[in-house]
Image (spheres, helix red, strand yellow):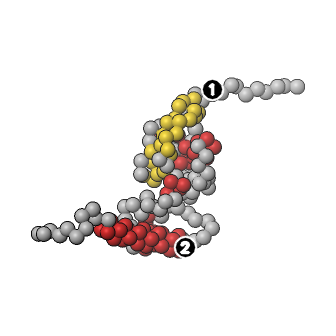
Amino acid sequence: MVEFRLPMLPQPGELVWSVNINGTEVKLNIESNAILLDVLRDQAGSLGTKRGCDMGTCGCCSVLVDGEPRLSCLTLAADMNGREITTVEGLANGHQLLSQNNNPTNEEIKTAIEGNLCRCTGFQQIVDSIRAASDIIRENNDIEDSTSAKSDPHPGFMEGN
Ligand code: FES
């Protein structure tokens, strides 16, 4: 009987990976060829980052790296060393989602979510949810503005008095 053996493949090296995930400094030992999606899910515990197609077409694995969208399934984790990563968990407070435009039109919303393929709800509910979130953010901003006016440390002081 002939015995076949696979040649030994070189093992990837390890490196210390130091990033900020959702505002928390994280330091992990990772393999030098690890994919960002795997590190986020398997080592950093960010299970909100989903694996969909695993080939860069669905957008399920999207994260923000230094504020820019990135497909984590196509990103080497080692290249992200020292960067700031925001996962969907980091958007939970709702303030970062619409930070650039808190009153988008439906067309702007559709453009912003372009490239994300939703397999379960269709897109209208997502657009409606983003619209509702923008309404809440603007409403909260109005409340904060009126509250800060009431907390004026010099009430009653008027210019010219
Ligand atoms: S898992 Fe589909 S784009 Fe990354």
Look at 44% across and 42% down and name the residue there.
83
142 left or right, relative to 17: left
Disc 1, SS: loop
Q: In which quarter of the image is residue 139?
A: bottom left
Please tell me which residue is depicted at 32% across the width and 65% down the height of the picture: 151
Q: What element carries label 2?
A: helix
Q: Residue 125 carries which label?
A: 2
Which residue shows up at 38% across the image and 70% down it? 143
Give residue 1's position: percent from left, percent from top: 88, 25
Q: Kindly identify the amino acid type of the residue bearing the numbered disc 2.
A: Gln
Residue position marked by numbered label 1 in the rendering = 10
> In the orientation shown, which residue stands out farthest toward the left?
160
Q: Do the residues labelled 2 and 1 touch (CB within 8 Å)?
A: no
Which residue is pictured at 57% across the width and 32% down the height? Answer: 29
Measured in 3D between alpha carbons, the distance from the residue under mark 2 to the one under mark 1, in whole angstroms, is: 48 Å
Type of amino acid under label 1: Pro
Which quadrant of the rendered structure holds the C terminus? bottom left
Mark 2 or 1: in front is 2
N-terminal-most mark, 2 or 1: 1
Left or right: 110 as drawn, with respect to 119 = left
Residue 80 position, x and y percent, is 47, 40
